[in-house]
Image (cartoon, helix red, strand yellow):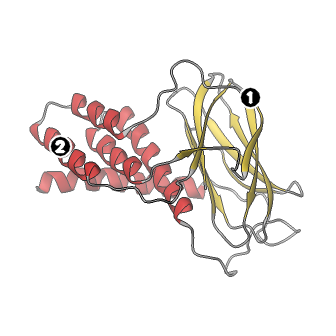
Amino acid sequence: MVRYVFAFTVAAVAVAALGGGAMRAQDKGKTAGKDGANVAAPGSPRAKADARATSVAHLATAYELIRIGEETKSPEALVLAAKLIAAHPTDPADKDSKTKLVKGDEPAKGDAAEVTPKALLAKAAKLSPRPYVAELVKAAEGDIAELKRGNERGPQTYYRYISGNSRCVFNGVYLGGQLAAITVTTDNGAADLDIYVYDDRGNLIVRDERPSRNATVSWYPRYTGDFRIEVVNASGSGANYRYIHN
């Protein structure tokens, strides 16, 4: 039992550390609340984050765990990622979505491989023959089987393709005082995805340009308004990617 707790603790601590670094990497383009930029100043009133924004944050953690698990051959990380993805299901973006893809609308290439908890658990089991890994996988399967989805829609997802050294542009509407959250991820480890968010006046609000196949941003708009979100592939390697937003 101690080994199980230790395994999950190691995975959780690793992601927490990386997550903190990711948030620190989100440089603000404008001083919050100044120059008319649509981003709340520190200490300003904010609404509680809605369930979908919270789910986006958990999914960002899950995809970081997948990256860590694949790079370090850690079955524990993949098991925890599987549980997070199962607990926070998404829905395909539809015509009613407040976020629209306006540039770089290229369908995903090849088989549109969905990252499923089942596939992650199978990959985790193959990484190690140790008995405790098999028990971790079995326990996770039981936990996931007990999950029941409510009637509320989850975060919305675009699954598209981005060429190397190019960008895709989304337009989105976000509510004032409520947390806005976006994560992009790809299975292509050679890709380097970044996110840049601009308000309707062209102010750069937030960005994540770490050298990573994943990128995540969040911010509180001062007022309800339009935002331009640019997803940039800073590598020469084209990739299918997921754009997940609340």
Rendered view: 125 above or below 23? above
**For residue 135, which quarter of the picture?**
top left
**Is 72 on the left-hand or right-hand side of 207?**
left
**Residue 77: image location, x then y, percent:** 32, 44
Q: Residue at x 37, y 33 (%)?
A: 70
Which residue was labeled with disc 1?
Answer: 166
Viewer-nearest residue: 133 or 26: 133
Figure quadrant of the N terminus: bottom left
The first of marks 1 and 2 along the sequence is: 2
**Residue 91: image location, x then y, percent:** 54, 46
Q: Residues within 10 Å of mark 2 (few under 14, many from 20)?
A: some
Q: Residue at x 73, y 75 (%)?
A: 41
Give amino acid for label 1: Ser
**Is 48 on the left-hand or right-hand side of 12?**
right
Q: Secondary structure at mark 2?
A: helix
Which residue was labeled with disc 2?
Answer: 138
Give amino acid for label 2: Lys
Whether residue 213 is visible:
yes
Give the spatial CA distance, label 1 vs label 2.
Answer: 42 Å
**Residue 229: image location, x then y, percent:** 74, 47
